[in-house]
């Protein structure tokens, strides 16, 4: 078994399932000690236990907190650092989606989106960076954006705005944290199979049909890219965004079944 990240301390937000879960799993496979964050205590504990049982180790520990609660998520980050001797790698994966036409977005839904995707991301990264600076750690921070942060997609005006802001945040932080040897980069997934997306029976076939690579992403595709950016050998990469979308943003067509659904009647 590879131990590329043996004894590294890694914290991942929004990791109960899907991409975040797989990122935790891949880091644990490579020897890291992982703090798995999820909104609820039960799901955080269940997901951690599942990975540990699969890998026959105890490298993953639960750190529940709602990302929209700044004090709670910063406490989880700080608790992990204190209990494990710091943080080497921080993955700001947590986020929510508001999928709605611009004229129908409600103020309360917009506020919640900002609380999670913007405030939660910003201040959880701040807590992790402070721990890295305090301990003199040349850390790695990886933020999770989306193809919607670089390419217009119908019904994602609010969501896409937050994901574009995350890309700009990485550029800004690459400058501010560079003096400490901390790199900040972004992974931007395209269509990715998950428990939620596969509820659409046309999801895989539809997105394969419009991807230049004729493939659709998996959580493992995103996790492997995240680990690449977290590696010590990637120290000369910072402020960058890697699209993991099978080439979709090169042309950006929608599957036929979505084109029909999303156009106003």
Image (cartoon, rainbow, N blue to C red):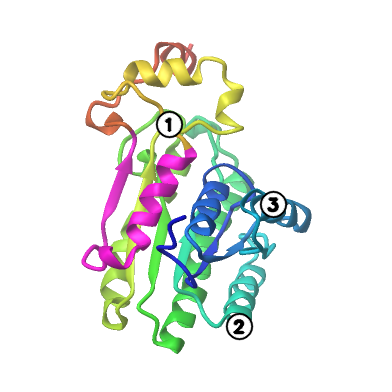
Answer left or right for 170 relative to 102. Answer: left
Residue drawn at x 38%, y 74% is 139
Residue 65 on the magenta segment = no
Q: Nearer the viewer, mark 2 or mark 1?
A: 2
Residue 239 on the magenta segment = yes
Q: Which mark is residue 191?
A: 1
Residue drawn at x 31%, y 82% is 180
Is disc 2 in contact with disc 1, using a CB cutoff of under 8 Å? Answer: no
Q: Which mark is residue 82?
A: 2
Residue drawn at x 50%, y 54% is 93
Q: Residues within 10 Å of mark 1 (few under 14, many from 20)?
A: many
Q: Which mark is residue 53?
A: 3
Q: Position of residue 81 (x, y in %)?
A: 57, 78
Q: Specify which label sits upstream in the sequence, 1 or 3.
A: 3
Instruction: Give the magenta-colored segment's residue range.
Output: 219-245
Residue drawn at x 55%, y 33% is 194
Is disc 3 in contact with disc 2, using a CB cutoff of under 8 Å? Answer: no
Please name whichever residue, 29 or 144, is drawn nearer the observer in this view of the structure: 29
* Element on which disc 1 rests: loop
* Element on which disc 2 rests: helix
């Amino acid at each position: 078994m590879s131990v590329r990240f043996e004894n590294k301390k890694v914290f991942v937000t929004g990791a109960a399932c899907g991409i975040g879960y797989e990122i935790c799993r891949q880091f644990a496979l490579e020897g890291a000690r992982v703090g798995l964050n999820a909104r609820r205590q039960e799901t955080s504990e269940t997901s951690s236990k599942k990975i540990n049982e699969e890998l026959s180790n105890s490298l993953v520990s639960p750190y529940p907190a709602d990302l929209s609660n700044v004090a709670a998520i910063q406490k989880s980050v700080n608790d992990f650092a204190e209990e494990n001797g710091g943080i080497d790698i921080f993955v700001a994966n947590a986020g929510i989606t508001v999928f709605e036409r611009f004229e129908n977005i409600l103020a309360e839904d917009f506020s919640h989106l900002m609380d999670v995707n913007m405030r939660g991301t910003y201040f959880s990264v701040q807590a992790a960076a402070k721990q890295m600076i305090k301990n003199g750690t040349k850390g790695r921070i990886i933020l999770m954006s989306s193809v919607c942060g670089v390419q217009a997609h119908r019904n994602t005006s609010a969501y896409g705005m937050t994901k574009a802001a995350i890309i700009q945040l990485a550029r800004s932080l690459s400058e501010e944290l560079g003096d400490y040897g901390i790199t900040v980069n972004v992974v931007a997934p395209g269509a990715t199979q998950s428990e939620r997306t596969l509820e659409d029976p046309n999801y895989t076939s539809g997105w394969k049909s419009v991807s230049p690579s004729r493939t659709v992403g998996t959580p493992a595709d995103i996790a492997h890219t995240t680990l690449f950016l977290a590696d010590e050998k990637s120290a000369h990469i910072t402020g960058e965004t890697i699209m993991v979308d099978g080439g979709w943003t090169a042309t950006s067509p929608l599957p036929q079944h979505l084109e029909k659904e999303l156009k106003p009647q």
